[in-house]
Structures are given as C-alpha cells and as structure tokens.
Amino acid sequence: MSGQQIFGLVTGMLSGLALFMFGMNVMSDTLTQLAGGQLSSAIDRITEKRLAAWSFGTALSVFVQSSVTGVMIGANLGTTATAWLLSLNSLGGSFWIQLLKPSSFTPFLAIGSVVFLMFANTARKKSIGTIVIGFSVMMIGMDMMSSAVAPLQDVPAFNQMMFSVSNPLIGVLVGIACTLMIQSSAAAIGILQALAMSVGVTFGMAIPIVCGAQLGTCLTAILASLQSNKKGKRAALLHLFYNLIRNSVFLVVFYLINMFVRFPFLQAETGAVGIAGFHTAINLLGSAIFIPFGGFMIPLVHKVIPYDKAEQQEEADTLTILNPLFLSNPGFALTQVKTASVMLADAVQEYFDAYLDSITQNTEEQLEKTRELGDKAGRYAAQLKKYCISLSARRMQDKDARNLVLLNNAVNDYAEMAERITNMLNSITQFREGGHSFSEEAEKDLRVFGSAAQEILEATVHDYTTQNTRLAETVQIYREIITDMHGKISKRNVRRLHSGECGQDSNFVFSDLCAGYERIVDRCDSIASHILTAAGEAVRTPSQEQYDAIMALFVDKFEELDS
C-alpha cells in the first residue's frame, strides 16, 4: 500500500471509531439521565432476588450500554445488545432486506432526529431526539470503519498479522489491549465486527479477542475504583473475578477439547452476526453457571480486601451510600443524596435529644455520648455538602437539578442545626466548668423551651422523611408558638436579672441557649418550605381547626411557664 492509501485508511478508521464511540456515549448518557432517580427505587425493589437482579441488569444494560450498573451478571449480558445492533449492517439480499441495514436508513433517521430536536419543546422530547441522533452517529461510525479497513484484505502482511491472532493467548492480549486503549469492550467488539464485514475474520480469531475484550472492561473498572472506598474496590474486583473465571475456564476447556476434537469451524470465516452470537452465548453460559453458584465469589473478594472492624466503624460513622462511582449516573446519585439527607436529619434529631439529656443529667458519660453524636452529624453534613457540589457539576435533567438544589438547601439547614447545637453544648459546658449554675426557675424555663423545640424538630424530621406537607402547612403555628414562648421566657429572665436571682454570666448563656432553640425552629421553617416546593404546592394559611389542635399540644408548656 502507498503512503497515501495508508494515511486514508488510518484517518478513515479513526474518524469512524470517534463517531462510533461518541454516538454510543451520547446514547448511554442520555438514557441514564432520562431514567433519572427512578433507577434507584427500581434497583432496591428488584435486586432482592438473584434471578430478578439478573433480569433487571440485562434489561438495563440493553438501554444504557454500560456494564457498570451494579447488577453485574445481567449487565454483562445486556451489553451484548450493541453487537447485535451492529450486526444488522451485514445484512444482504434483496433491495427490501437491504433497507433494513442501519447504513441504509441511518442518514434519514439522523436528519429526522435533528429536525425533531430543533422543534422539541420539552426536556423529555429533547432526550429522545438526542438518543436517536446518538444511535445514528454510532451506526455511521461503524459503516465508516468497515469501509476504511476494506483495502486491507489485499495486503498480505495484514492477513499474516490477523492469522497470528488465531493463537488464543495473542488474541486475548489483543482484546484486552484494545479495550484498555478505547475504554469500551463494546467498541472493541464493534471494531472486530467491522473487520469481519470487510476483510474477513475467522472464529479462531474472534473467540479469544471477544474474551479478551470482556477481561479488558474489568480492568478499566479496577482502575476507576482506585479512588473509591473499599466497597467500590470490592465491586470492581467482583466484576473482574466473574469475567476472569468465566472466560478463563471457557478458553481452557474449549481449547483442551480442540486439541483432541479439532473443531473445523475455527477456520471458517465469521461475520458480524457470528461475533454477536458468540458474545451472547458466552454471557448466557456465564449466567447459567454463576446465578445459582456465584455466591462463592463474595468470600473470595473479602479475602482479597478484608472487611475489618475499622471499616465497620467507618461505615457506621460515614455515609457509604455516597459512592463517587455513582456520580456517573446523576439520577441514581441524586436518590442516594436524598436517602443520605434523611440519615443526616435523623442524626441531628439524635444529637439534639442527647444534648437535652446532657443538660439535665450533667455527667461526663452523657457529655461524651453527646459529643460523639455531634461529630457523627457533622461528618454526615460535610460529606453531603461535598457530594452535592460534585453532583451539581454533572449534566442532569432540569427536574433533577431543581431537586438537587432543594436537597442541598435542606442539608445546609440540618448542618446549621448541628452547628447551633454544638455551640449551645460548648456554651453550657464552659458555663458549668466555670462553677456557675442557673436558678431553679431558669432551669425549668430552659427545659420547657427545649422540649418545645424538640417536638417541632421531631415533626420536621418525620415530615421530611415522608415528604409530608402537613408540617409545611402548619409551620406558621409552630413559629407563633416559639415566638410567644420566647417572649414569656425572656420577660421572666429579665425579672430574675433585676431581682438578683441570676447574674450577668448566667443571663448571657441563658439568652444564647434560648436564641439557639429559636434558630433551630427557624431552620425547621426553612425545611418546611423545601417540602412544599418539592411537592409543587404553595404556602397556605392554616385553618382554625389546625391552629387549635396544635396549640392544644403545647398548652401544658405555657401553663408551666405561667405557674
């Protein structure tokens, strides 16, 4: 081949590969965004049973075209759909059969989807148009690769090189290397199909390359997991073990039998359909074996990456559901943030309850327990804030973006509550360590005010967890209750100050604690507005019945203040 022919072949191959991978990534990303947070609830429901998890992973990967979905075995089978789509380009026959080839209808599909996208007036319609464009670009890229490599069939050196790939070890290494370079086993197998349609590829060449490509995609997952926690590393290692055991056992058994039987089809040429068929067959075989007997891999993974006590404690103190790997699926990551924000809400509630107990019990043991709970709430808040920042940089649907803003605001509210409780705890601890104390009446006022704030926080956390708008509808009443209570307590404190029952030091700390309680209720008010906004509702004036019912819950506290 002349230099000009080589240059044209290389540029044509690279251009086709670029379009192929771009189209596949556009399809994958857009489908993932279109699914959004619905993936999480579906996974939670379906993956409780192994067979259901396999079915779900298969169906999910058919559309998303990524084996990193968490439902490993089914996901591996689902990715074989790409090869079947690409094999349609090898159809031959009459004019009407030729029309079924993607290379025949893709140009019309592409221009139609572009026009559709230009006039789409909703995010969902735009996503559908983008998916179709991604499919069209992927198929155009496949056709370009096939056309670019066609001249190689007349090059003896290339044919000799392809013959060497019939060696199973070399074929596996070629498949691994190709996948590592382009970071996609589907694209590596797509290149093999393009060669099969243009220059001819035998089964003996295709089988080890396909197995190597599947091993290569596991190595890319291993590399991606290096920045993850141990849980992420275990997931990637489990994926590697599955593909390594499945492909290695198949290759060893297959070629051992071939030493005695000599399979004649290994020398026969395979088309794109044959490659897709083998790709599916080996994944079906792996599914049949590993679904009922794959449990042995879990202990194997734990032997490589032990699950020690330190990690158990770390998981108890951190939000392990906020895995950085989930950020590649913004909709799923958003649902994880929502779940984690509920965990933060519970942690803040637990911290405030312990704080109130520490005021009444005043023991070192209780104080230590309270500080530990405060550290836990602080860690949760810091993790969530950092994760929300990372997630906000990802592309997502408009609805998911709005929900992320609301969740981030709620996280900030709970984080401020935790900081406020810490400040109050430090204030009263220093006050007592200095040898000071409150009068009996002041102690009672703080207990009543703290109990009222505690009940409102409990209602807030409950309604936030269930996304119940009841709190949001009645928060005005809670605000009125706290304002009235703070006013009465402040007047009583001024009276004690003038009478000499309390000194300036106790007055300062007392006022600081009361302001802290009211600030916590302010944050409850803010969270109530987030609940309403998420539900698409506006603030409504509470009815007289609601007012009377809630006031009745706090009447004993007002009576205690008046006594």
Image (cartoon, grey):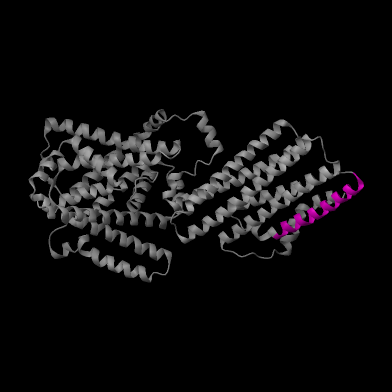
Say if 393 sits above or below 424 in the image: below
Tell me, yes or no, if residue 90 can be seen here: no
Tell me, yes or no, if residue 163 can be seen here: yes
* Number of numbered discs: 0
Q: Residue at x 74, y 60 (%)?
A: 547
Query: Along the line of sight, which residue is nearer the eye, 211 or 97?
Result: 211
Q: Residue at x 49, y 43 (%)?
A: 321
Query: Is 516 colored magenta in this rendering?
Result: no
Image position of 223 (left or right of 150): right
- What percent of the width, then of the height, locates residue 75? 34, 45
- Residue 74, by quadrant, is top left
Residue furthest to the right in view is 499
Segment tinted magenta in the rendering: 476-500
Image position of 442 (left or right of 150): right
- What percent of the width, then of the height, locates residue 242? 33, 36
- Residue 98, by quadrant, is bottom left
Say if 93 sits above or below 430 in the image: below
- What percent of the width, then of the height, locates residue 96? 16, 65
Q: Residue at x 70, y 53 (%)?
A: 521
Image position of 12 (left or right of 412): left
Say if 4 sits above or below 73 in the image: below
Query: Is 483 colored magenta in this rendering?
Result: yes
Query: Along the line of sight, which residue is nearer the eye, 504 or 319?
Result: 504
Query: Along the line of sight, which residue is nearer the eye, 513 or 264?
Result: 513
Looking at the magenta stretch, what is its main secondary structure?
Answer: helix
- What percent of the width, then of the height, locates residue 383? 54, 44
- Residue 544, by quadrant, is bottom right
Image position of 30 (left or right of 450): left
Residue furthest to the front in view is 3
